[in-house]
Image: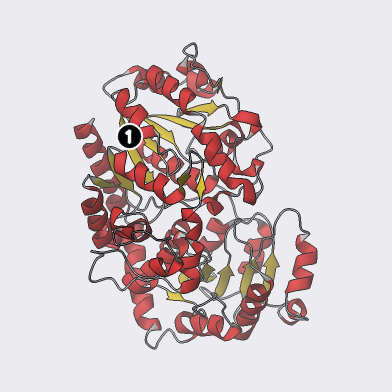
Amino acid sequence: MFQLPMGWILKPNIAESSINIPNQACNSYNLINLLSTSEKHNTNMSTQFVNHDHLHVVMFPFLAFGHISPFVQLSNKLFSHGVRITFLSAESNISRIRSTLNLDPAINIISLQFPNGVSSTADLPPHLAANLVHAIDLTQPQVKSLLLELKPHYIFFDFAQHWLPKIASELGIKSVHFSVYSAISDSYITVPSRFSNIEGRNITFEDLKTPPPGYPQNSDVSLEAFEAMDFMFLFNRFGENLTGYERVLQSLGECSFIVFKTCKEFEGPYLEYIEKQFRKPVLLCGPLVPEPSRDVLEERWSKWLDTFPAKSVILCSFGSETFLNDDQIKELASGLELSGLPFILVLNFPSDLSAESELERTLPKGFLERVKDRGVVHTGWFQQQLVLKHSSVGCYVCHAGFSSVIEAMVNECQLVLLPFKGDQFFNSKLVAKDLEAGVEVNRREEDGYFHKDDVLKALKTIMLEDDKEPGKHIRENHMKWGKFLSDKEVQNKFITDLLVQLKSMA
């Protein structure tokens, strides 16, 4: 599902060497020259690249790291099974992409040239985000020229490039819509039947509060008013005079097939519904459980965490792209204080504001002094994956980003879910209702307001009353899903099964 707010990232300071392809068709570049020096010396890898018995996949995600990361994860998985990968992105994203590739594999990265220097969400303020989608549309000549030269078997693309299936089809290349969102979210919002009963009137948020016709009967998923209103931006027109909804629907409808980073064990009914709606294959790569970080937890964090008992610390973080308002910060901080448990609260603010000043202004008066022996408030970059892995951390209060949920389950950290936008609302419902492996913070229906007591109640359920129901049941399910995700054979089979399907359909 289309969601621009995922894309606000910090622009890297270090530029990776790359090749710029001009807007006009260009056939003079050499793929071997795109390899790093270390990769050129890997003769076995180079031999693999010229072996046409191997599949060749081009990856083209939206230009925001929340979208790029799943494409990189899948690239690493496929590459480890002998698939040749070429990655298309903007120059400002290249260094971050390269840093997340496991063991510096020989994956080609080609930098696309964007008009007026706009090349990532870091280059634009939020209110101009739609301009980047338009800029991506202007790369069509470059992409067509590259595909003509590369001649891959497949191109995996994101929500924004609705024009890609047609170009790929003309060149005899199969196009794959790779959804970085959960199936429950796409099945609810962006399916053909969503507005089949609406004629002659404008769409309202009330239309989104209930599921589309034919939705899985065993699902009780619906949207509260404040959640439904968050999706209304999908129906604004921009870039080729299409709404975001029309763009995504065209992308899903015209691609060769769809791939989701999920599994039937998690989302079987929603995947079947999508397959029926679009009448095309829906393939799966599994949840893409992240590989263990090669970094080391900073000493300041390890020393502090080591002072607390196992599974007693709460990590509260909502990612770098979510900014809480004053009321949300006050109620969240107060709820953590009332719990009596040790915690790390990570808060971020827009780059044009002073984080120190904002913390002083928004946190409850005297809060830092009262919790100084058991609480830390942090802003800025944070080693989330490594902190979650620490033995003292036992609970994760988060925005229900799918990757964050997976990390919590793998590391046996109980989940308190507090979503703020887009697919997060659906991820939260999936975990709390379908999987019964976490607890949602209760919210006011009309505006999403929550009180400190709502935060405290959720924390009590899984941290302080874990021997009672529903906390006991939630913990048991959480452990079950954690074991499932930690089973390397099971997770690897998702990739090998996908690879078999890709080879058979190439």
Point out the residue furthest to the top here. Answer: 28
Point out the residue furthest to the left here. Answer: 504
Q: Is residue 342 left or right of residue 169?
A: right
Residue 179 in sight from this viewpoint: no
Looking at the image, is 441 positioned above or below residue 276?
below
Q: Which residue is mark 1?
A: 175
Q: Quadrant of residue 124?
A: top right
In the rendered view of the protein, which quadrant contains the C terminus? top left
What colour scheme governs how the chains and residues are painted in the rendered image of this protein?
Answer: secondary structure
Q: SS of the residue at dot 1?
A: strand
Residue 496 in sight from this viewpoint: yes
Q: Is residue 480 left or right of residue 70?
A: left
Number of disc labels: 1
Q: Nearer the viewer, residue 246 or 422?
A: 246
Q: Residue at x 21, y 53 (%)?
A: 276
| Residues packed near mark 1 inside 10 Å, few (<14), some (14 to 19) or many (20 plus) | many
